[in-house]
Image (cartoon, grey):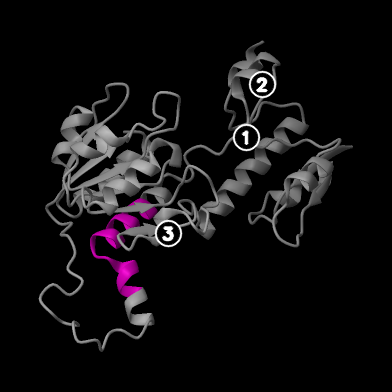
Amino acid sequence: MHKVLITHQLPGDKMHELSSSSEVTVWMGPGLLGAEALREELKDCVGVDHIDVAAASERSIAGGNTPGVLVETTADATFALLLAASRRIAEADLYVRGGHWSDENAWSPDFFVGKDVAGATLGIIGLGEVGRAVSRRAKGFGMRVLGWNRREKSVAGIESVSLEQLLNESDFVCITIALAKETRHLIDVDKLALMKHDAVLINTSRGGIVDEEALVDALVKGRLGSAALDVFAREPLAADHPLVRLPNVVLSPHIGSATHETRCKMADMAAANALAALSEQPMPSCVNPEVYER
């Protein structure tokens, strides 16, 4: 009988089907499954984490994924971060919780003034499914939407421009591009210098796309208005990371797809892949389907 390791308790209905054809082990804690425990639990199991797709394909190993299911949820999170940063929601929340609302400076003309979203210009770096979903939300706010993609792509309602023009003209810049060799530190010192001094940078893609040291420097020196980040170069973000100390940054712990409905769909898709693979059938959602043609 096949052995399957599930590294966390997951929602969804299809996970239960695995137990009918496989010996299933579910990590119940306490806490998350650590590296050493993972190595031990994976002995004789079917299981993968971060897949080297090229190496897997060379060995005719199919890898499953969960494409498309998190698009709308991640776009929601992206726009939520945009709004939170524009209206300084995180700062205001801490201000109220800290008992400062009665301070002398409360209700002054510049008391927690933010940045208008309606009618502003949004630049989207990466015009894949998430980027296009963010654009649809922006249209509801009457925003002008600029877009840049590594490979030229025409999308209705989005002005296709150079990356330099996008950074120069945008009030808000959303990063929704995939992390690759060509996009690592795409947003560096020089790119940040092109942005408006009161612009907002939002990243819900991958942390490595932004040079965090350069970002911190720009925020501290007032060369950038604020940032809202769900992803980081190293995760979890260290408690003493400079970003944590900046009031003009909204931080969330990589929760772009974290809704109950989406996680259930992801779990069901993962289980469907596993069930197909264990039955020696093509995975319905396969990251390297060419292996089935060999």
Q: Which residue is mark 2?
A: 56
Left or right: 152 as drawn, with respect to 212: left
The residue to which callout 3 is attached is 244
Left of 21 or right of it: where is 165? Answer: left
Pointer 1 local density, CA inside 10 Å: few below 14, some 14–19, many at least 20:
few
Residue 157 visible in this rendered orientation of the protein: no
In the figure, 214 relative to 159: above or below?
A: below
Disc nearest the viewer among 2 and 3: 3
Q: Quadrant of residue 106?
A: bottom left
Q: In the image shown, does 224 or 123 lie closer to the viewer?
A: 224
**Horizontal and vertical percent for residue 49?**
66, 37
Residue 89 part of the magenta-drawn span? yes
- The answer to whether any part of residue 154 appears in the image is yes
Question: Going from the N terminus, do you reach mark 3 or mark 1 first?
Answer: 1
Looking at marks 2 and 3 on the same chain, the residue that comes earlier in the sequence is marked by 2
Residue on which the image places disc 1: 50
Q: Amino acid at mark 3?
A: Val
Q: CA distance from mark 1 to mark 2?
A: 11 Å
Q: Does the magenta segment cover residue 37? A: no
Of helix, strand and loop, which one carries label 2? Answer: helix
